[in-house]
Amino acid sequence: MLEVINLEKSFGGIRAVDGCTFAVENNTITGLIGPNGAGKTTVFNLISGFYSPDGGKIVLNGSRIDQLPAHRVPHLRLSRTFQITRELGKMTVIDNLMVAPLDQMGETLFNSWFRLRSVKRQERKIREKALYVLDFLEIPNLKDEYASNLSGGQKKLLEFGRTMMTDPEIILLDEPGAGVNPTLMKKLNGYIERLRGEEGVTFFLIEHDMDLVMKLCDPIIVMNDGKVLAEGTAVEIQKNRKVLDAYLGG
Amino acid sequence: MSGSVGFLIFFLTYAIVYGILAIGLNIQWGFTGLVNFGVAGFFAVGAYVAAFITGAPSQYHLGGFGLPFPVGLLVATVVSGIFALILGFPVIRLREDYLAIVTIGFAEIVRLVIVTERHITKGPYGMGVIKPYNDMVPASFYGLFYLGIAIAVLLVLYLAMERAVRSPWGRALRTIREDERVAVAFGKNVNSFKLQVLVLGSMIFGLAGAVFGHFFNFITPDHFLPMETFLVWVMVMAGGSGNNLGVLFGALAIRGVWEGMMFLSDVLPTGIQIGAVRLAVIGLLLVLVVMVKPEGVLGEKKTASDILGE
C-alpha cells in the first residue's frame, strides 16, 4: 500500500536518507528500527510531506505523494504521530480530538456564519466520534482537561487518538512506546492490534523498544546510515549478522 | 448637553474605536498567534480612505467623492484588506517574526506617505472629515447619535467575530497558534488560514479607522503613530487575549486610565509632563497584569468550539 523507492534526503553535507527502498504491505504492523541517526524519523517526515525529498519516489495506493504539500497528505488517509508529543496545550482534550477530522465544513468563515445548521450537524458527528475515541482509549474522564495537564503517557494516548479521528487507512507512529510505562504499553499494543483487526488499519511504526517490536511487528525493516539494511520477520532480524553488527558496533 | 455628559460620550465613542481595533488584533494575535505590529498603518488607511470617499470634492486632497457614510465604511474596510493581502501574500509562509518586521515597516511607510504626499492627504496639516447625517440630528444630540452608530458597528462586529471564533474555523486557528505542525498533520492549510486572518483583522482595523475619522472629524498623520499600535497590544494582552469580551474590557480600561490621567495634571507638581507619565503608568499596568494574571483579566474560554452549546 505504501512504497518508498530510492528515497534521498540530505541536510547540508549529511545524507540522512540515502537511497532507501521498501514497501509497507496492506494491513500489516510494519516496524522500522535502526540505531540513532539511521534516518528513520526523516523517512517519516518525508512520507508525511513535512520534508520534500531530494530524490526518489513515495507511492501511496498507486499514486505519488512526494510532491504534495504536507497538509494534503492526510487527505489520502495517512495519519501520523510525532516522536515528541505535540499536544495542543491550551485546548481541552476533546478539542484536541475534534480539530483532527479532515474536510470540516465549519472550517470556512462563510459556512460558520451562514450555514450554521449544516455545520452543527457535522459537528455533532465529530463530537460523537471524539467521545467514542476517548472511550476506546479508556480516558473519557479527561475530556475537559487542558491537554497541557496530561501526563506523558496520557499525551501519547491523545496523539494516538487524534490519528483515529481522521479514519486513516495507514497510521505512522513515531516511537509510541517512548516514555510509556509497561502497563500502558500493553494497552497501546492492544489498541493497535484491535484497530488492525477490526478496522483494517495498516501500521508503520518506529520503535526502540526491541521487546515491543519483536512481539508486535511483522515484518520489520532495519535502517542504518540512511539505507535499508535488512527486512524480515522478528526471528530473521534477530539472527541477521549485519543487524547485530550495526547495533553492537561489530 | 452638559460638559461631563459630553465628555462621557466622547470617552465612550473613543473607547469603542479602540475596542474595534482590539477585536481585530485579538483575531490575529489572540486566536491565531500572528504578530502584527502595524495596527496603526491599517487604522490610518481606513481613516483616510473613508475621508476621501465621504468628503466633499476638494482640490487640496484626493476625492472627496461625497458618497454616503456606509459606503465610506465599506470601502475603507475593503481597501485595508487589500493592503493586508498584498503585504501578507509573500510573507505569511515565513516565520512569524518576519511578519512582525514587515508590518512595522508597513505602518511607518503609510504614515510617511501621508506626511509627504500633501496633494493627496494634505500632509501634516491634516484633513477634515464630515459629520455623517449632520443635517438630520440636532447639534446638541449629535455626539450621542454618533455614539449610537459606533455601538451598532461594534455590536455587529462582536457578534460576527464571536460566531467565527466559536466555530470549527476558530478551533483551527487555535490549533495553528498552539502548534502549526499539528495543524498541518491534520490537513489544515495553515498558510490559507493565516492569510485569511491577516486580511480579516486588518479589515477590522480599517473599519476602526473609518469610524474614528468620522467621529474626530479631523485626521492627521500624528493620529497614527506607532504608539497607537502599542496601546492596542496592551488592551489585548491586559484584557485577555483570546477573549473578545476581555479585549473590549481592556480597551475601556486602558482608555480610562489614559484619559483619567489628564485629571491628575492639577495634582502633580508643575514641570511633570502628563503625556510621559501616562505612558509609564500604562507600561507599569501591563507589567503588573502579565506578572499577576498572565492570561489577562478575562482569560480565554476553555472550550474552543461551542456551537453545539455543550
Image (cartoon, coloured by chain):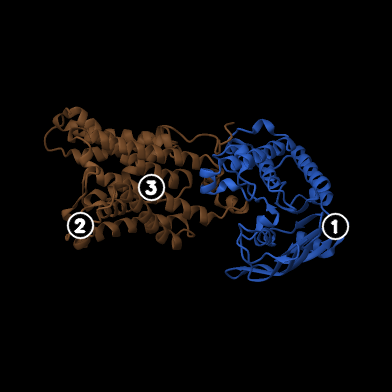
The residue at which mark 3 appears reads as B204
Nearer the observer: mark 3 or 1; the answer is 3
Q: Colour of chain A?
A: blue
- Secondary structure at numbered mark 1: helix
A2 lies above or below A175: below
Q: Residue at x 69, y 40 (%)?
A: A129
Q: CA distance from mark 3 to mark 1?
A: 64 Å
Question: How many marks do you count on the picture?
Answer: 3
Write the residue at 54% across / 49% down: A108
- What numbered label is drawn on residue B60? none
Mark 3 vs mark 2, CA separation in Å: 27 Å
**For the residues tagged 2 and 1, is the chain the same?**
no
Report the residue at 60% width, 42% height from top: A118
Across and down, in percent, residue B123 comes to: 19, 58
- Amino acid carrying label 2: it is Pro
Amino acid at pointer 3: Ile
Mark 2, residues whose alpha carbon is within 10 Å: few (<14), some, or many (≥20)?
Answer: some
**Image location (x, y in percent) of residue B201:** 41, 49
Residue A238, numbered circle: 1
Q: Which chain is brown?
A: B
Mark 1 is on which residue type?
Gln
Q: Earlier in the sequence, mark 3 or mark 2?
A: 2
Residue B284: quadrant of the picture: top left
- The residue that label 2 is drawn on is B57
Q: Circles 3 and 2: CB distance less than 8 Å?
A: no
Q: Which subunit holds the residue at mark 3?
A: B
